[in-house]
Image (cartoon, grey):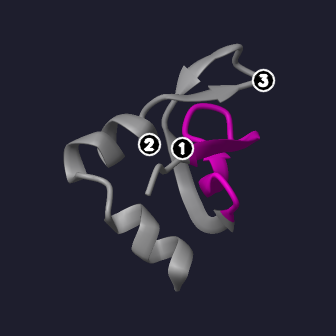
Amino acid sequence: MEANRKWLSIPEQTRKMLIGKVFCAQCLDAVTIKDFIINGDPAGVVLEGKCAECGHPVARVVKIDK
């Protein structure tokens, strides 16, 4: 719940940008993350899901300064 609250504290436009710019080691490019879950992290939150292009697992740490 806390991780989701942190994620929702980020403006919607910024969240959309973060979802659309996740590095995929398979595609070797920035891709959109799909089917992701939001986990807590000491720095903020971690998005863990799949590459929308190839389905390879991807993750992104989102630092939140509060």
Numbered disc in front, either 2 or 1: 2
Q: Which residues are magenta?
A: 41-62
Question: Label 3 to label 2, Cα distance in Å?
Answer: 16 Å
Instruction: Please report contact status of discs 2 and 1: CB closer than 8 Å, yes or no.
Output: yes
| Disc with the residue nearer the chain's start (2 vs 1) | 2
x 78%, y 23%: residue:
26
* 46 lies left or right of 1: right
Question: Callout 3, which amino acid?
Answer: Ala
Confirm whether the magenta stretch covers residue 2: no
User: Secondary structure beneath disc 1?
Assistant: strand
Give whichever of 60, 31 is nearer the camera. Answer: 60
Instruction: Please report contact status of discs 3 and 2: CB closer than 8 Å, yes or no.
Output: no
Question: Label 1 to label 3, Cα distance in Å?
Answer: 13 Å
Up-down: is 18 above or below 31? below
Say few, some or many: other residues with alpha carbon within 10 Å of mark 2 (under 14 / 14 to 19 / 20 or more).
Answer: some
Residue located beneath label 1 in the image: 33
The label number, if any, that marks residue 19 in the structure image: 2
The location of residue 32, given as percent across then percent down, is 48, 36
x 47%, y 74%: residue:
4
x 48%, y 51%: residue:
64
Confirm whether the magenta stretch covers residue 57: yes
User: Secondary structure beneath disc 2?
Assistant: helix
Instruction: Please report contact status of discs 1 and 3: CB closer than 8 Å, yes or no.
Output: no
Q: Main secondary structure of the magenta part?
A: strand
The location of residue 44, given as percent across then percent down, is 58, 56
The label number, if any, that marks residue 25 in the structure image: 3
Give whichever of 35, 8 is nearer the camera. Answer: 8
x 29%, y 41%: residue:
14
| Disc with the residue nearer the chain's start (3 vs 2) | 2
